[in-house]
Amino acid sequence: MENYTFNSLTLQMEGLRVTKTSKYPIFIFLLSIYVFIFNANLGIVLLIWTDRSLHQPMFLLFCNLSINDMMGNSLLVPRVLADILAPPSERLIHYYECLMQAFTTHVWHQRPHRANHHGL
């Protein structure tokens, strides 16, 4: 057996192992969690935005955290949902898309940690 090296910008995702029988229950479960998280955070943002008495620093922090959570989940979950339904041979991602996902996920998840670490 020979080792072949390809210079391709398309990567195949191998870590996501979903059987044919569990594909739809996992998809429905993850989709329902995503919709709940998105709607709950959107409700928090709308409540803080519409109620003038909630325009205080603490509630604006809650608003920013909700927006951050919506954006972070919207970055990863739709792609995972699409990959759950795709056959394993078609779970492909372009190198630059993978790089952008890794970068934004790292930046998104590191921001609150750094702020708390430095006491800001």
Image (tube, helix red, strand yellow):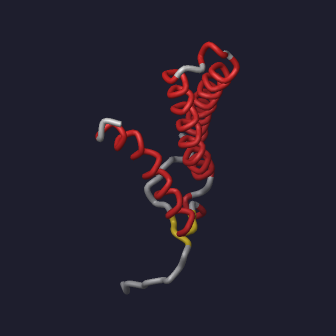
Q: Residue at x 62, y 54 (%)?
A: 86
* Extreme-top residue of the structure: 53
Quarter of the figure that contains the C terminus: top left
Give the quadrant of residue 87.
Answer: bottom right
Give the quadrant of residue 64.
Answer: top right
Quarter of the figure that contains the N terminus: bottom left
Residues 98 and 45: in front is 45
Residues 58 and 1: in front is 58
So how many labels did they put on this image?
0
* Extreme-right residue of the structure: 50
Q: Residue at x 59, y 34 (%)?
A: 34
Compared to residue 100, the image places residue 28 above or below, namely above
Compared to residue 23, the image places residue 52 above or below, namely above
Compared to residue 95, the image places residue 113 above or below, namely above
Judged left or right of residue 120, residue 101 is right
Q: Position of residue 115 (x, y in %)?
A: 36, 40
Q: Position of residue 22 (x, y in %)?
A: 54, 40
Residues 30 and 65: in front is 65
Q: Residue at x 29, y 40 (%)?
A: 117
Q: Position of residue 33 (x, y in %)?
A: 57, 30
Q: Position of residue 17 (x, y in %)?
A: 47, 51
Give the quadrant of residue 90.
Answer: bottom right
Q: Residue at x 30, y 36 (%)?
A: 119
